[in-house]
Image: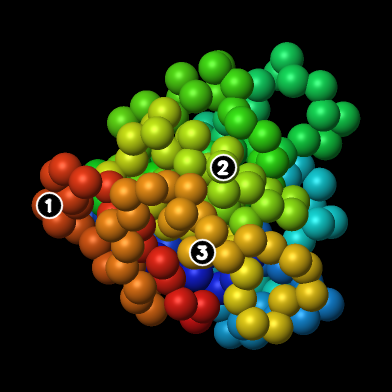
Amino acid sequence: MQIFWHGYTSVRIESKNGEAASTLVTDPFENETSIRFPRTIEADLLVLSHQDRKRFNVGAVQGAPFIISDPGEYEAKGVFVRGIQDSLVEEGRERPVIYRITTEDMTLAFLGHIARKPTDAELEEMERIDILLLPVGGGDGLDAKTANELITLIEPRIVIPLGFAIPGLKQHLGSIDEFCKQLGVCKREHMNRLKIQKKDLPAEDTLVAVLDRA
């Protein structure tokens, strides 16, 4: 599996299950945000972390992706996606969705546009997570303090921080350094992509994989 970060909460996950190769993309953003979403990305699955699809630059993703923006269970090309949303939380008719994604015998949790701590019901769906992708810089997503609390609760083997400050953003977001300060013990590596197999997952300390924008 390879994971790339495009900015904000947009990632690209390339994986293969048997003979079926797939590309999953999350949360494509509008170019008005001051950084541009790549023009050449093609996806098989497009996962949106809010039910309001108008929040995202869906048309920028090439191909004919299967779009997921609602709670429920989905499968395409050997990738299993579960959209999670506590029906008891009142956040208006269109609400954020968090996701549990299983591919290549690894389980990922993706928290894109949620800005609060998940409820107990939502956290029950987040057990045994190998890779946790979550915003850490505030704004429309989790801030560093809440992200740190979640990492402690979920205990993933790898954390990929999203939604933090990078050069050129109009929106004010917290820095990756501020997040690591909240985390305390921060075993941190910078890389242009995360290339990982199940056998290579850390056995003990959680790794913070800080991805450069692709």
Q: Is residue 24 visible?
A: no
Tag 2 or tag 3, which sits nearer the N-term? Answer: 2
Say which residue appears at 37% left-offset and 27% top-offset.
Answer: 127
- Say which of marks 1 and 3 sits in front: 3
Q: Amino acid at mark 1?
A: Lys
> 148 or 141: nearer the eye?
148
Tag 3 or tag 1, which sits nearer the N-term? Answer: 3
Q: Which residue is mark 3?
A: 176
Q: Which residue is mark 2?
A: 145
Which element is circle 3 on? Answer: helix
Residue 52 versus residue 120 in the image, above or below: below
Q: Tell me whether circle 1 and circle 3 mark residues in contact (CB < 8 Å).
A: no
Residue 75 versus residue 138 in the image, above or below: above
**Which of the 4 quarters of the picture holds residue 139?**
bottom right
Crowd around label 1: few <14 · some 14–19 · many ≥20 (10 Å): few
> 174 or 131: nearer the eye?
174
Residue 95 versus residue 122 in the image, above or below: below
- Name the residue furthest right: 92
Say which residue appears at 35% left-offset and 73% top-offset.
Answer: 190
Q: Position of residue 191 (x, y in %)?
A: 34, 75
Q: Which residue is mark 1?
A: 199
Say which residue appears at 58% left-offset and 65% top-offset.
Answer: 175
Crowd around label 2: few <14 · some 14–19 · many ≥20 (10 Å): some
Q: Residue 190: which numbered mark, if any?
A: none
